[in-house]
Image (cartoon, rainbow, N blue to C red):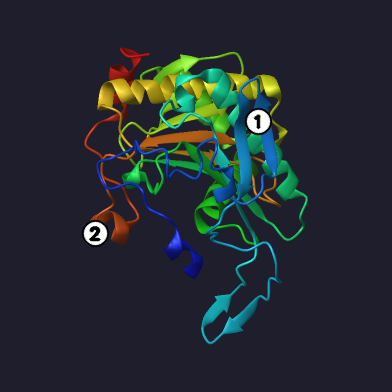
Amino acid sequence: MISTDRVARPRHLEPGRVLDADTSRCPFCPGNESHTPPSLLTVNGPDGWRVRAFPNRFPAVGIEGELDARARGPYDVVGGVGAHEVIVETRDHVRPPWHDPRQQALALLAARDRMRDLARDSRFQAILWFRNHGPEAGASLGHPHAQVVALPIVPPRLAHITKRFRRHHQAHGRELMKDVLDFERADRRRVLFDDVQTTTFLAYAPRFAFETWIVPNAPAASFLEATDAMIDEVATAMCRVIVAFDRVLAEPPHNALIVTAPAGSGPGFRWHITLMPRMAAFAGFELLSGASLTGTAPEEAARLMRTKL
């Protein structure tokens, strides 16, 4: 994807700093709402807004236009049509939502509602939610916020995950994630905790050390279908995991991702959340091979995290 608008976005963070303490120039702080586009969704509380969603001023894709899919020489080209929104997850510049499960739940409920709205647009094939915290994780602003991007295509990694889920279901008649959950619950070495509707465990083959998954126990293809009760539970699990990251790894940058079914995913998909501390960058080996090297086994990472839950 090529988006020349992204070059102009403000950068208040430098490597090694996950928070910019200067709130006066933060466009996401209360009182600075005029520095952002008008809200698409606002969650209010007794002291004012608690969560805001609005179009990104520096979008990767634009809501207006046509797909204009065509061939250009050996390349397949699609116009940059889509939606790119920001969800300010808390009015508090310093206290992140993962320190308050109820605030995290409000932010996820807002995300679900915005994703549901975008999914009504037939041009969009995939709806992505992610949070970048810290410059090493891709954040340019310190105020806690997430982003939602709607795309007219299914991006390569999500297409690969969808294909894996579909093939397993076709071959075995059951979900791949069910088999993963059954294996992890029996093994227990990577499981952090079990909840009523979800299980939280460290990835068997992580992209980054301490990569953690939160997975619904029952079949559910799309996060857009998650109930309020499910989101409350997931929010609490996210908070427990990220606080454990902070205690074990000294408040590392992190990425949070909601992996949810794209349009036409077929049977076998189960949505889940991935949480990844970003303590190392991809280098030449990872970029060339597509494989990942980590210095901590997931079993040891899980043992360390369980002591800090």
Mark 1 surroundings within 10 Å by alpha-carbon count, few (fewer than 14), some (14 through 19), many (20 or more): many
Between residues 275 and 142, which one lies in front from this camera angle?
142
Taking depth in this image into account, of 64 and 212 the one nearest to the observer is: 64
248 lies above or below 145 = above
Left or right side of 116 for 106: left
Residue position marked by numbered label 2 in the rendering: 284
Q: Is residue 185 left or right of residue 80?
A: left
Q: Where is residue 238 in the image (x, y as percent from the top left)?
A: 48, 25
Report whether residue 173 is seen: no
Q: Is residue 138 visible?
A: yes
Where is residue 211? Give x, y as percent.
Answer: 38, 34
The mark closer to the camera, 2 or 1, is: 1
Where disc 1 sits, the SS reads helix
Q: Which amino acid does label 2 sit on?
A: Gly
Q: Relative to residue 296, is residue 141 drawn left or right?
A: right
- How far apart are the alpha carbons under marks 2 and 1? 39 Å
* Residue annotated with mark 1: 109
Q: In this view, does 181 lie above or below 205?
A: above
Specify which label sits upstream in the sequence, 2 or 1: 1
Tell me: residue 296, above or below residue 282: above
Work out whether residue 284 or residue 35 is closer to the camera in this orientation and state it.
35
Question: Which residue is painted at 57% across and 19% down in the image?
Answer: 102
Give the percent coordinates (x, y) of residue 88. Answer: 55, 38
